[in-house]
Amino acid sequence: MSRQHAIECALTSGYNNPSLVAESETPNAPSSARRRLLSTIGATSAQVVVVDPYLKCSKLREVAAALQLRRVARWKNITELTVSAREIDFSRRLAIVSRDIHRDDRHIVIRRALALTAPVELVEGFNELRAQCMRNQQVHSGLIYTANAYQSSSSFRLWVEHCRERGARLVTHQHGGGYGIDPIHLGEEFDVSVSDTFYSWGWDATDGGTRVRSLPPAWPDRHTGQPSSEYLLMSLPVTSHMYRLQSFLMPSHVADVISQTLALIRELAAPTRLRIRMHQGDALPLSQISTLDATVIIDDLQASGTMAASRAKLVLHNYLSTAWLETLAMNIPTVCFCDPVMYRPRAAAQPFVDALAKVGVIHYSGIEAAKFVNGLNGDPSAWWQSAEVQEAREAFVARYANFSENWLPAWMEEFERLLAE
């Protein structure tokens, strides 16, 4: 295969995936109808614009929040512009890739990678997208708040840069796990760097720099009745392809986690009922387990993750995701198992992680976690409510998962503080 033919194949195969061509909503993004409804609430003169906040609450609660904040803030629908361009300009991209083909310095490598991977909307459709954005969206010169619209929406990035040139400030909020904990977290570094202020889930400027402040996220929706008799396993995406530079998506790590997870399931004693919840990718290869004492059920994903977790007697996690922060914050009995090489916390987080490991929340193999769960004799609540477990949980949550029922007054106070600066 010639070098040029190989490049053409790379371009073609990449763009057969529609997600590389057009903007797509993140799993937690609100629906179009919800966005339109929220955008009607609040005065057009409001000094704070809210775009795609990370709220794992009901539509009704988000609408109620928008109503209560309408004096200073309004929700804005800015992330759904699309472009008509769908064809790749092969000649233009190949010219970029082929230029200085024998040089391998980092600038050339980055330029080639962009030519091969940049979505159509940012190359062939860029001028159209920018024109739409400037034509259809009013410039805002106050505060712009978002969780991660700048990661998922090209139209938002174009609009917010236009606004910042006219004095607007961008404030963003943590929207996932690993922030403040992982020794290197590219998402955290990027989020902090593009923000005038970045809000964490509890950790502060001593961990993330002077732009970082703590601001609680909204308390997630949860089941308020008695838990079921089931254990819930919240699993990482099973994939053989790396699509983001995070440890739990590296194919070799995924393969190891699958092996550890199968070992855990194999070890669980009867009469355990285990519900497995997975998003994206392939299914866990349960056929590799010949005999099981536990009863295994695959979750249909009809309920939200926080709702499913709050219905369970115990929640197991095979990676340290956003979900384990949520179950710890919601005070749901939680057991995690992970590879200590892949999940090595930064120095500031180490004592808090060690405290969770000491009381049995964190384990470093699937079998170790299963033996611990079996030792609970079907009653995790007695262990979970013990003073030592709650002390370790509360210390960790205050710093890394400070979800709050009183998040709205905290947001109002913070917005008013920033506007007064």
Image (cartoon, rainbow, N blue to C red):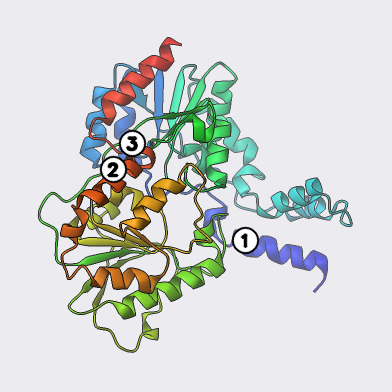
Classed neighbour count for the residue bearing mark 3: other residues with Cα under 10 Å, few (<14), some (14–19), many (≥20) = many
Q: Secondary structure at mark 2?
A: helix
Sooner in the amino-acid sequence: mark 3 or mark 2:
3
Along the viewing direction, whichever of 244 and 84 lies nearer the viewer: 244
Q: Position of residue 105 (x, y in %)?
A: 83, 50
> Distance between the Cα atoms at labels 3 and 2?
16 Å
Q: Amino acid at mark 1?
A: Gly
- 2 vs 1, front mark: 2
Q: Is residue 9 left or right of residue 404?
A: right
The answer to whether residue 354 is above or below residue 268 is above
Tag of residue 14: 1
Q: Is residue 89 left or right of residue 224?
A: right
Quarter of the figure with residue 267: bottom left
Q: Which residue is mark 2?
A: 394
> Distance between the Cα atoms at labels 1 and 3?
36 Å
Q: Please tell me which residue is depicted at 88% across the width and 52% down the height of the picture.
A: 100
Q: Please tell me which residue is depicted at 51% across the width and 21% down the height of the picture.
A: 169
Q: Please tell me which residue is depicted at 45% across the width and 69% down the height of the picture.
A: 257
